[in-house]
Amino acid sequence: MSDEAQPRHYNKATGGWGSMEGMARVELTTKAGPSALATLKEQNKPGGYMCSSCAWAKPPEPHVAEFCENGAKATLWDLTPKRCTPEFFATHTVSELKTWSDFDLEDAGRLTHPLRYDAASDRYLPVSWETAFAAIGATLKRLEPKSVTFYASGKAALEPSYLYALLARMYGNNNLPDSSNMCHETTSVGLKKVLGSPVGTCTFQDLEKCDAIFYIGQNPGTNSPRILHPLNDAVKRGCKIVAFNPLREKGLLEFTDPQNPWQMTLGKPTQIAHQYVQVAAGGDIAALMGVCKRVLELDAQTGNVLDRAFLDEHCHGMDDFIAKVHATTWDEIEENSGVSRAELEAAGDVYAQAKNVIGIYGMGLTQQVHGTQAIGMLVNLLLLRGNIGRPGAGCQPIRGHSNVQGQRTVGISEKPELVPLDKLREIFGFDPPTEKGHTTVEFLEALLDGSARGFIGLGGNIVRAVPDQSRFDGAWPGLDITVNIATKLNHTHLRPGKESFLLPCLVRAEDDRQASGPQQVSIEDSFSHIYGSIGRRTPASEHLKSELAIITGIAKATLPPRPDWAWDEWTADYGKVRELIARTYPDEFYDMSARMDQPGGFYRGNPAHDRIWKTESGRAEFTVPTVLTNSGLTKAAGRFTLVTLRSNDQFNTTVYGYSDRLRGLSGNRMIVLMSPADMADMKLADGAVVTLVTDCGDDRRRAVSGLTVTPYDLPRGCLAGYFPELNPLVPLDHHDELSKTPAAKGVPVRIETS
Ligand SMILES: Nc1nc2c(c(=O)[nH]1)N[C@H]1C(S)=C(S)[C@@H](COP(=O)(O)OP(=O)(O)OC[C@H]3O[C@@H](n4cnc5c(=O)[nH]c(N)nc54)[C@H](O)[C@@H]3O)O[C@H]1N2
Ligand SMILES: Nc1nc2c(c(=O)[nH]1)N[C@H]1C(S)=C(S)[C@@H](COP(=O)(O)OP(=O)(O)OC[C@H]3O[C@@H](n4cnc5c(=O)[nH]c(N)nc54)[C@H](O)[C@@H]3O)O[C@H]1N2
Ligand SMILES: [Mo]
């Protein structure tokens, strides 16, 4: 637990000795031991185990240690010798455990036995797998298929994910929301609309050829630290990085390479960002508009800035967009972006001078009410100079969970139009449902209105990850059934339905042995590369099953028996599941088992990368934003825009510890960061304890109390604090207009002091 009450400051570069300290501390907490360190040595290397932390690429020629501080933490966290056994559950009731912190619940260790909730004693009791599957199957058969939701959290590999989606469709629905619905769904919808492809257009090699990177709303030092190596290399080549972020994130400022002994001991850190645009929270549409305005001005002067051949041949809607840029004044741009004209012109100059530009972005763009418009705006800028679909250029979201993109690729999607239903019909001989399923937000709405009757979770912690966090507590017990497939205990497991099962699974680093021998799985990274992964560690308990075996166990107990639905055969040999994936998606996954083990994996391709635009017009689409702020918030006296963030010591709702080293903060997660100028205006001292209250105009009071005011270098009007502690402040209906991704980066709040 926290041993320091006040945050303290840290001023070192990203990487370096600090990251070594961070890993050592988690090693101490988890007591993972020397064999876990052996696992780290083969992490992200061909023939090894693929990290279960973020979705960054696994390069064909890996470094000696191809893992980062946070990947190491994730592995050590999985491989802890601590165990959360039936004895633990005999000692603690569910009501008591509900009062524990996220950290303490997961710190109880790995789940060891399948468990069933017993309402009479308010405890989880051990149950056999057979009894659990039979009971789950009996209840699911009784329920109306449309009332059951199959959530997934982005970690499970391609093989179990494919079967999970198949199970939901054979059962009779497309209720397959994913953590992606709270994350990059804005990308899946926004990029699809303008480029015809829902994923990034770059390959790893493009990073070696770009001359500028526009790096928007993503925190590499914490959330995808291995990207710091290619960024570092790019800067050394002369590539200019222009960062857009309301926070001056350390990873974008400077980096000490932990792989480089000289730099670790003597050398100077590399300066990462050539220019740091400290945009107002939600100010990116306006800021990018300013950059575009400068590019058009330069073109008007010289006539050779725009890529006219590309624009003529490949784009649609440019005239309307250009008219909008001309009609938008610099005053409006400065007012809405919070950035001066001179700074945006400087960014425009970098863009215009660079031959190849990549636009990289993360949650700062996606978790906004107008997130899809913001992504459209970034694409507008890239299109002006033909920076999509050629080497060294492209639009590249940085995805979250290690296989979140892959889960969508193999069918975990509530949008049936994204799934080859005809292939499923042909291969499995059933009529897949065609009605659209629940997004995460729609599941929550169904939970509230009582139409949801069952919830199955393939990993994750939906109770803590969602908006309006505390609003659903009363609804969960009304569900007929909740089933969670998990590795460690979290608050979602403590919201049992009338019937409830907690099913423990192997982690990716563990030896997964089935009837045909040890099994490999595969995952897809942010660059659409697919890799094999094999676990070698002894499982945490002999009672664990793989995610795939649990899914097939539920399927067998729920669906009518058919010889061609060969659940046992598929469980015995995951290669058979890869054959099914290849039959369903032949163009991308042919010969999958062989290709996934080649160094660097295989690229499944992306039409936009080859300038084939699967959009409505058949061309890349310029879009005209209808607003200048991503958050859509209007300014009002005393109102702030709250940004919810990850610390350097967490993976989503998994809290490893209480240090946010790269931001110089530690000891307390119940803080609110605030600019000293706003503190002075509000007469708040460093260390004052306040309540944040949502200011969205509906009648519901949403408040989080006990937050310590902490001065921080932020633009005026912007507050920041931690996810998931601040999730009760995000209204359920405060989400991106098209994708319904909750707008966790633009929450309107007020400060109460008493
Ligand atoms: N160690 C670790 N790694 C992780 C995760 C983790 O929790 N821990 N989570 C994983 C997951 S699921 C995901 S999706 C990714 C998330 O990785 P990121 O996309 O980096 O997500 P966040 O940390 O939420 O913050 C994004 C950044 O957006 C900035 N920002 C906020 N508002 C704005 C804005 O209006 N404009 C701009 N330009 N920037 C803004 C914030 O200051 C922050 O730097 O990381 C993945 N990797
Ligand atoms: N306010 C706010 N809210 C947010 C965000 C934000 O930035 N701000 N970010 C959003 C984003 S980007 C995301 S992706 C979601 C995350 O939402 P989720 O993906 O639902 O949450 P996680 O915290 O990643 O899930 C952690 C749990 O997963 C289980 N687990 C871990 N490893 C495994 C495994 O290998 N197999 C299985 N079966 N289970 C495992 C463990 O029980 C662990 O407790 O949160 C979203 N919510
Ligand atoms: Mo995410």
Image (cartoon, rainbow, N blue to C red):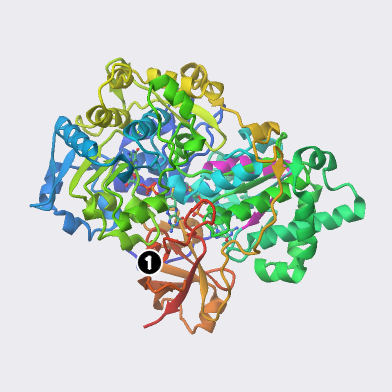
| Left or right of 80 on screen, residue 661 | right
Q: Position of residue 652 (x, y in %)?
A: 40, 51
Q: Position of residue 3 (x, y in %)?
A: 31, 63
Badge 1 density bin: few <14, some 14–19, many ≥20, Cα 10 Å: some
What residue do we see at 42% from left, 49% from top? 21
Residue nearest the observer in this picture, 336 or 710: 336
Look at mark 1 in the image and give the residue it sits on. 670
- Residue 114 in view: yes
Residue nearest the observer in this picture, 259 or 127: 127
The question of residue 732 being in magenta is answered with no
What residue do we see at 90% from left, 49% from top? 303
* Quarter residue 49 falls in: top left
What residue do we see at 21% from left, 54% from top? 477
Q: Is residue 733 above or below residue 579?
A: below
Quadrant the C terminus occupies = bottom left
- Residue 495 in view: no
* Quarter residue 7 falls in: bottom left
The question of residue 229 being in magenta is answered with yes
Disc 1 beta carbon < 8 A from ligand 2? no
| Left or right of 606 on screen, residue 158 | left
Q: Position of residue 174 (x, y in %)?
A: 40, 39
Please report the bounds of the magenta region as a residue range.
Answer: 226-244
Q: Amino acid at mark 1?
A: Met
Chief secondary structure of the magenta portion:
helix
Quadrant the N terminus occupies = bottom left
Q: Position of residue 129 (x, y in %)?
A: 18, 32
| Left or right of 243 on screen, residue 143 | left
Q: What is the secondary structure assignment of the residue under circle 1?
A: loop
Q: Is residue 203 above or below residue 716?
A: above
